[in-house]
Amino acid sequence: MNEQDFEGTLVLEKLALIDKVDEFFEAIDADDLQEAKSLMKRAAVDSETIAIVLKKMSEADDQH
């Protein structure tokens, strides 16, 4: 998957399967990249997608 084809819904669906969507959003709100990464790994999100999500989180943080 490349960044242009990124679909965040797929990440949320995988997180929902392990009932961790709320925790994921809390990690995003807290700018906790490590926790977000850990949750995505637990949800079996592939490493390329995890990298894209973390990059987008960092970019969003840079805009504040």
Image: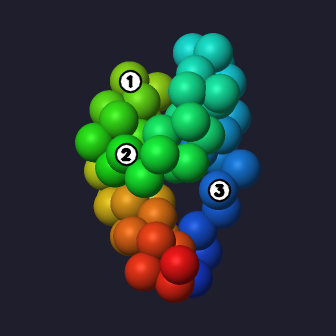
Within the image, what quadrant is residue 16 found in? top right
Q: Residue furthest front?
A: 64
Which comes before the other along the chain, label 2 or label 3?
3
Amino acid, disc 3: Gly
In the picture, measured across the screen, residue 58 lies left or right of residue 10, that is left
Q: Amino acid at mark 2?
A: Asp
Distance from the alpha carbon under mark 3 to that under mark 1: 16 Å
Provide the secondary structure element on which disc 3 rests.
helix
Could you tell me residue 53's position as x and y percent? Answer: 46, 60
Q: Quadrant of residue 62?
A: bottom left
- How far across and how far down the image is residue 61, in percent? 46, 71
Can you give x and y, in whole percent of width and height, for residue 30 in the image? 47, 46
Any mark on residue 42, and which?
1
Q: Is residue 20 in view from this perspective?
A: yes
Point out the frontmost of discs 2 and 3. 2
Dividing the picture into quadrants, the one containing residue 11 is top right
The residue beneath circle 2 is: 32
SS class, disc 1 = helix
Is 56 rendered above or below residue 8? Answer: below
Q: Earlier in the sequence, mark 1 or mark 2?
A: 2
Q: Residue at x 39, y 70 (%)?
A: 58
Going from N to C along the chain, the mark reached first, 3 or 1, is 3
Nearer the camera: disc 1 or disc 2: 2
How far apart marks 2 and 3 lie (CA) works out to 18 Å
- Disc 1 packing (10 Å; few <14; some 14–19; many ≥20): few
Question: Which residue is found at the position 60% from the left and 75% from the top?
Answer: 5
Q: Which residue is mark 3?
A: 8
